[in-house]
Image (cartoon, rainbow, N blue to C red):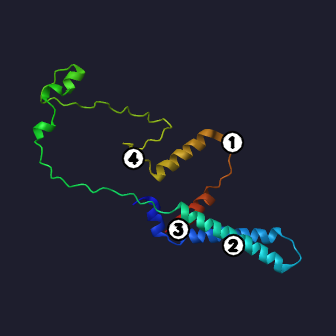
Amino acid sequence: MDRWSVQSEAFPWLERVAAEVLGLAVAIAAWRALEWPNVISRFSTSALAGLTVFAMTFVLLKKVSAPRRHPIPRFEIVDLEPVAAAILSPPAELLLRLEDRLGLQLAASDELLLDDPLVPADPESRVVQLFRSVPLPTAGEMQGRIERHLSARGAEAVAPDASGELYEALAALKNSLR
């Protein structure tokens, strides 16, 4: 069964609906295009145009989407005998081994190990360290670092202190998430 016959069997109404929609669109377009004062002649002309397009589209879709049936010959089912594994595997002299490719003599117990250690990142780098062995600083340690940084800047740049408002906003946000 080809794809056209499956489509027409699954949706037998599809061709008719497509032709109806196109015919209706033509009828509406003809109604708007004609500005005749006589409503009856305007209606009959637009309806005739819509019905004509509907009929032509319906016939065309039926001819185009008609399922094509091709005869398929029936084949006999033949019982196959199991084939021995020795016949399927290539001879040993045709196998290319790792020793042959690399030119090495490897013992049977030798293993190929990937020796590519990761270089540790600089602790002061600005690169994000996803698998960090040192635990992250606590909130108190972070507060101390911030205070040391602000005191090191000195009096040359005094920023307005909004830490109280920030703390309250963060506390309100934390409470709203609970």
- Are there few (<14), some (14-19), or many (20+) residues within 10 Å of tag 3? few
Question: Disc 2 or disc 1, which is closer to the eye?
Answer: 2
Of mark 4 and mark 2, the one earlier in the sequence is 2
* Callouts 1 and 3 close, C-beta under 8 Å: no
Q: Is residue 119 left or right of residue 158?
A: left
Counting the numbered discs, the total is: 4
Give the residue furthest to the top: 103
Badge 2 element: helix
Of mark 3 and mark 4, the one earlier in the sequence is 4
| Percent position of residue 88, x then y | 15, 38
Q: Residue at x 68, y 51 (%)?
A: 160
Badge 1 element: loop
Residue 157, numbered circle? 1
Q: CA distance from mark 3 to mark 4?
A: 26 Å
Residue 37, numbered circle? none
Q: Residue at x 87, y 73 (%)?
A: 36
Q: Residue at x 56, y 61 (%)?
A: 170
Of mark 4 and mark 1, the one earlier in the sequence is 4
- Are there few (<14), some (14-19), or many (20+) residues within 10 Å of tag 2? some
Q: CA distance from mark 2 to mark 1?
A: 83 Å
**Camera-side residue: 94 or 125?**
94
Which residue matches tag 3?
A: 175
Residue type, label 3: Asn
| Percent position of residue 138, x then y | 44, 51
Which residue matches tag 4?
A: 135
Of mark 1 and mark 3, the one earlier in the sequence is 1
Residue type, label 1: Ala
Which residue matches tag 2?
A: 51
Give the residue furthest to the bottom: 40
Q: Is residue 20 left or right of residue 84?
A: right
